[in-house]
Amino acid sequence: MTLSLNDILNKRKRVEKVQFLSKAKRQQLKLEKEHQQKQNEKILPIAKKKTVAKDSDSLPSVPADSNAIPNHNRNGSVKAKKGDAKFQFQWNQEEDTSLDYQPLITVNDGVDQRNIEKDTHWRRKSISEMTLRDWRILKEDFNISSKGGDIPNPLRFWGESNIKKEILDIVHSLGFDEPTPIQRASIPLALASRDLIGIAKTGSGKTLAYIIPALNYLLQLPHLESGDQIPQVLILVPTRELALQVEKEFKKFTVKLDLNIISLIGGHSIEENVNSISRGCEIVVATPGRLLDCYERKMISLAECYYVVLDEADRMIDMGFEVQVLKILKLLPTDQNRFTSRPRNTFMFTATMSTAIQKITKNYLNQPGTLTVGELGTVVDTVTQEVRYFPNENAKLNHLFSILPSFRPPIIIFVNYKKTCEFLQNQLSKNTALSSTVIHGSKNQDQRELAIQNLRSGKIDVLIATDLAGRGIDIPNVSLVVNFQMANGLDSYTHRIGRTGRAGNRGYSITYLGPEDSEIFSEFRKLLVKSGSKIPAELRQHDMNEKRNMRNIEL
């Protein structure tokens, strides 16, 4: 159909003029539109309309109604919307053939396996599915760091290790469902026959971290008849109490594995040591002084001790055993004088890395791997620390008597002097209903062992002790540790309060400060800040005074 110029002009005028349609006209237009759609369907199948999500940058659709009134300029041309970058075609969307496009494969149809791998926790993966990222997350979860090169990945679960089945059966029977962080880190390295330095807070489970590899080592060696056995595993510890504790933990395994263990400690007579050694043993737990005494008397041989552990090495150095420890290490066999490919393994566990410890590791450990759990010099996070300042002993006593009934036994109170032990025991018996016992340097070995046994069994409520019992004593479920007198150093403080909050349990500690402790205020305040503990006003004031004095000196 050909339109004349007049027809076009008349049509444009009709479009520009606002049209008001009657209901009948609107109904007629609707019927005409439906008829036109049916005609189109006969020619070209029309896909069903799809709802397409539009983003903020998409263009608005053009009305399909042919009677819609476009927006014109004065000269009759259609106005372009501001900000529209694309040309808009004015056609019926139902005539868009792209609606029929249905590809067999689209980019988003598949499952992105990489995202699944990232979202799956390492606990739900098999060990073969673990990625470098998974191992990094595992180490971050348990605050494990390592250095030394070629360090094996941490142990995820007991069943994934090379530990012998008979040992794992005992581990599960004792209720150790999962390894602790230090066990996760150190056991794979020990099983790989690498020397190691394990740095972890007290109460972290490090005893089991060397017991299991030691037993695994022994089960691979030829078994000797009783009486012919000579020590093949040596455990050096700083105190008699810790030696007895380690021996007790070993015996949970050795009685079922047909292995023998003895302890060589002061307080037991030489005759007792001779009888123990004569019965034969594979494992010796000893303090440095008594071991050297037995060796010099030719009571024991160290010729087959190719598995050596220094437990709480920093404590041994602090107690003045450095000379004895170095002498023992020189007496031990080396790889050169052994007719086998199995090297000597030396394992050192410590809470701090002093200069003396670094010297020992440099001279007597062979390319060790260093494993750190947590941060050095910090307190285990299962212990809540409360610190109070009192000007005199009477104020401390009054507060102590008021808080003790709020805690269930067993309770440990630490002091710095033997006379304070006796004084406190006397005051507790007069002012409370709690039973107590004491441990200090003047008590013989039998008295110490009896005191600890009574506390462990529940016959005694409170143990009052000097730092002699500060390390290695593992009394379960200690609810409260009181530092009636502040420790002389932060290391001793850390190990004192480490007697509570062990094996994942929560614990509580209360420390009394006085004017006599001012020299340690600054460093102690830093430790409290680091652990998020409340700081007494006296410590804050002392820090402010020191800063003020420094400014005055500079002026």
Image: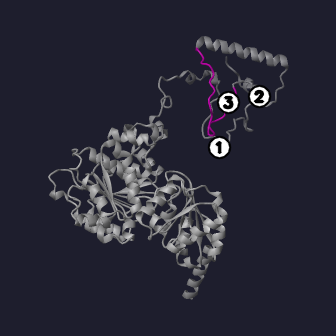
| 10 Å crowding of disc 2: few (<14), some (14-19), many (20+) | some
Residue assigned mark 1: 83
Question: Which residue is at a point 63% across and 71% down the rendered structure image?
Answer: 396
Quadrant of the image containing the C terminus = bottom right
Q: Badge 1 local density, few (<14 within 10 Å), some, or many (20+)?
A: few
| Depth order, front residue of 430/33 | 430
What amino acid does circle 2 point to? Answer: Val
Inspect this view and state whether residue 201 appears.
no
Q: Which residue is mark 2?
A: 15
Q: Which percent across, then down, holds residue 263?
A: 33, 57
| SS at circle 2 | helix
Between 272 and 309, the residue placed more toward the observer is: 272
Which of the marked residues, 3 or 2, is nearer the chain's N terminus?
2
Q: Are marks 3 and 2 in contact (CB under 8 Å)?
A: no
Relative to 128, residue 245 above or below: below
Q: Amino acid at mark 3?
A: Val
> Mark 1 falls on what kind of element?
loop
1 vs 2, front mark: 1
Estimate the spatial distance between the alpha carbons at disc 1 and disc 2, rounded to whole Å.
26 Å
Camera-side mark, 3 or 2: 3
**Sequence-wise first label, 1 or 2:** 2
Q: Is residue 46 magenta?
A: yes
Q: Which residue, given by chain and number where applicable, does mark 3 sit on? A: 62
Name the kind of residue labelled 1 in the image.
Gly
Residue that lies at the very extreme toward the front in this rendered image: 271
- Horizontal and vertical percent position of residue 284: 30, 56
Give the magenta-colored segment's residue range: 44-63
